[in-house]
Image (spheres, rainbow, N blue to C red):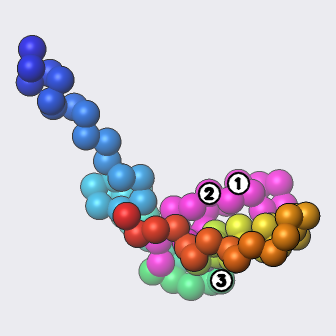
């Protein structure tokens, strides 16, 4: 009973480690935005209405850009990337 509770609660991290092994090339590929190869393209982003997987850097860039465009709120410094845990 106890082991049931303890085991199986581990959720693989979506963007690193085990989780990405199931992805093609372990999640690596060429980012369609910055054309960099051998980067991890794990971040889904809608570009021109199509869901595309892009790299972390582009994801962050797009996020920041959107935030800047939206900027109805007073200029709050964009969050310095996602924390690396
Ligand atoms: Zn990129």
Q: Is residue 54 magenta?
A: yes
Q: Secondary structure at mark 3?
A: loop
Residue 26 position, x and y percent, is: 36, 63
Q: Where does the N terminus fall, quadrant-wise?
A: top left
Instruction: Give left or right: position of 38 versus 66.
Output: left
On residue 44, the disc is: 2
Quarter-of-image position of residue 5 = top left
The residue lying at 63 percent from left, 83 percent from top is: 35
Residue at 62%, 71% in the rendered image: 79
Does the stretch in magenta take in 51?
yes
Residue at the image point whose x is 45% and y is 80% from the top: 38
In the image, which disc is placed on residue 34?
A: 3
Q: Can the viewer see residue 32 in this picture? A: no
Mark 3 crowdedness (10 Å alpha carbons): few <14, some 14-19, many ≥20 = few
Q: Which of the pair 65/16 is nearer the observer?
A: 65
Please tell me which residue is depicted at 71% across the width and 67% down the height of the picture: 63
The number of numbered badges drawn on the structure is 3
> Is 55 placed above or below 35 here?
above
Q: Residues within 10 Å of mark 2 (few under 14, many from 20)?
A: some
Q: Earlier in the sequence, mark 3 or mark 2?
A: 3
Disc 3 to disc 2, C-alpha distance: 14 Å
Tell me if label 1 and label 2 are in contact, CB under 8 Å. Answer: yes
Q: Is mark 3 within 8 Å of ligand 1?
A: yes
Disc 1 designates what residue?
51
Q: Position of residue 73 (x, y in %)?
A: 86, 64
Query: Is 84 on the left or on the right of 66, as rendered?
Result: left
Mark closer to the chain start, 1 or 2: 2
Q: Which residues are magenta?
A: 39-56
What is the spatial separation of the Cα atoms under label 3 and label 1, in whole angstroms? 16 Å
């Amino acid at each position: 009973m106890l082991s049931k509770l303890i085991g199986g609660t581990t959720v693989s991290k979506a963007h690193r480690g085990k989780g990405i092994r199931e992805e093609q090339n372990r999640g690596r590929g060429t980012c369609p935005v910055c054309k960099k190869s051998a980067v991890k393209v794990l971040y889904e982003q809608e570009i021109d209405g199509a869901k595309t997987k892009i790299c972390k850097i582009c994801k962050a860039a797009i996020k920041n850009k959107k935030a800047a465009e939206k900027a109805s709120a007073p200029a709050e410094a964009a969050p310095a990337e996602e924390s690396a845990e």
